[in-house]
Image: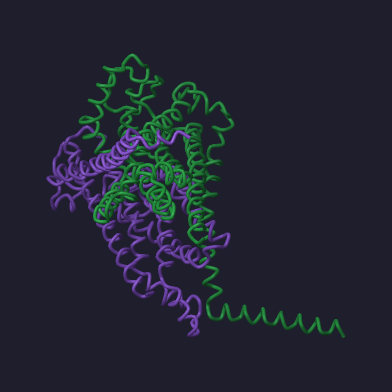
Chain colours: A purple, B green
Amino acid sequence: MNTSKYMSGNRQVRRKFINTFMLTMTIVSTVIVVIPLLWILGYVTQQGLPAINLAFFTELPTPVGVTGGGVLNAIIGSLMTVGLGACIAAPIGILAGFYAAANPNTTLGLLIRFGTDVISGVPSIVMGIFAYTIIVLPQRHFSAYSGGIVLSFIMLPIIVRTTEEMLKLVPDTLREASLALGAAEWKTSLSVVLPAAFNGVLTGLMLAIARAAGEAAPMLFTAFGNPFMNTDFNQPVSTLPHMIYVYAVSPYADWHAKAWATALLLIVLVFISNILARLTVWWRVRQLGSVTR
Amino acid sequence: MKKNIMHIQNNYFAHRIRERWRQLWQYGDGLYRFLILAACLLVLLLVFAIGYELWQNSALSRHAFGWKFIYTSDWDPALTNTFGALPYIWGTFLTSFIALIVAIPLGLGTAIFIAELAPDWIKQPVGFLVELLAAIPSVVFGLWGLFAYIPVFIRPTSEFLNKSLGFLPLFAGPVFGPSRLAAGLLLAIMVFPTITAVSRDVFQAIPNAQREASLALGATHWEMISQVLVPYGMSGLLGAIILGLGRALGETIAVTMVIGNNLDLSASLLHPGYTMASIIANEFTEATFDLYLHALIEIGLILFIITLIINIIARLLIWRVSSRTRMEARV
């Protein structure tokens, strides 16, 4: 009706202005968001680097007031718990990933994908309580076992989902060729599909390990912490993130420095695994793309 | 005669089935299928096992307090042994709410920038930075929050808010460093990668025909985004936000480090507080008698149920948009 209103230059100017303004705001929000990341990285490096030396990796914590010492007990404890977690979660997760990739549209296939998504949203502290009730309560003491088992729950959904995604990237022609040659289904999975997706599956495992290595909350009442050296799975151990927590809330400057150094160690570990994971996925997609072509 | 034929047929089918089973097990496929199925069921069992254990181990507290546990605020393990979780539930929702208010516009803005505007050479590194932010362990966020974020950013912001808006109970003084505001604003940084990554995927899943149609009708770039893409992907974007909410509700160690852990019932954002996750982290190993322990586990149960419901809703919303776009892309 009133077409002149829509043709008027005024409105055009306003639309253009809103357009430019909002698009600029998206750039601004991106910048705002990148700032904390750089701030965290810079600050952790600046604070942590001076405290990192050989003793940091090879010595036990010293008593309060005595400078020096290291976090060897926590490094060993982290290796124990994360290693145990990976040993439990990897076989189960990879097998479940095989099922999900082979049966994408069955009820159970959908349910497993949905279920893993939901499990990955369960707070880690709730996982910690769960492990506490099934392991620590009956045993009446904290242990590295219970810590490892919590971490396996946390790793499980990540391993299942990445395995599934990576197996889906393997072209069906490979699978069909193997089956057509008379190989059994498990033989095809194990010696054709898994090697083709091996790097990807390994990547998923690595991401899961990186995630688990940074978990402090469930460790509070499973692995519990231990200022001494311990390699017995049945006894409490310290882990790196738990050590950061304990040291950070303490009032001692020397312990704060150790917390920063430990944080730097964790971040480096996490970043290396993430960068490797990224590169692997990128490389796989490119390579498999050329195969199917 | 007819009976005879059926008998032979039955025999034949039974033989086929037996033969098939023999093959399955002889060549190992039966075992393989059993194993992958068992692994699947084990994963699914985990959800039920968690719920069951938490339910069983909070029995004392559930029987003693009933629903009162949720809406009363006495937490006295020393004298009267009464427990009410209201302050913690309130603290959890308040901090998550602050986090979402900040993270939603920033997260969606960044997602739009990455998915719709940025050229490839910016898209890749920015996407990667967002992933890195998601990968930083929560205890490192807490450490940074305690020693850098609070003194450099939170404290001045709090003081400014108190000075300019101090007449509101929301910003009543005195100003503490560790506070609900600090926890909320730290959570904002932590949930932001979730919101961005999921909503970026939602935007990228929208078929190009939608964009082309709206641009061809004369829409500006922003009109295309706000009037076509956002409504189209609405359920997915909502899913992304709810997923972020789920992360904020359950976040433990970083919040425990910056919220101040004080049973403060005032409405002020600038006062220290408590969340459900942080009371568990703080008092779980100090729970000296069973009722106390069960009360803490019941808080865990509430947290579990809330995050479970929230995650289910979020995933359903996200799945809806992705299955819809897949169907329309085929047409």
Q: Is residue A1 above or below residue B326?
A: above
Q: How many marks?
A: 0
Quadrant hosting residue B167: top left
- In percent of width and height, residue B27 lies at 53, 80
Residue at x 48% of width, y 65% of height: A101
Q: Does residue A287 lie above or below B71 as drawn?
A: below
For this orientation, the residue located farthest to the right is: B1
Residue found at the far top of this picture: B167
Does residue A265 appear left or right of residue B254 in this picture?
A: left
Residue B151 visible, this angle: yes
Q: Residue at x 16, y 38 (%)?
A: A254
Q: Whole-percent x and y of residue B244?
A: 41, 42
- Nearer to me, B290 or A268: A268
| Quarter of the view holding residue A292 | bottom left
* Residue B272 horizontal side relative to residue A130, left or right: left
| Residue nearest the viewer, comparing B273 with B6 | B6
Q: Estimate the x, y position of residue A135 in percent, counting from the top left.
A: 46, 49
The reply, left or right, for residue B110 in relation to residue B51 is left
Residue B236: x percent and y percent? 46, 47
> If the image is split into quadrants, where does the N terminus of chain B sit?
bottom right
Query: What residue is at 69 percent from the left and 82 percent from the top?
Result: B15
Q: Is residue B135 visible?
A: no
Looking at the image, residue B160 lies above or below residue A72: above
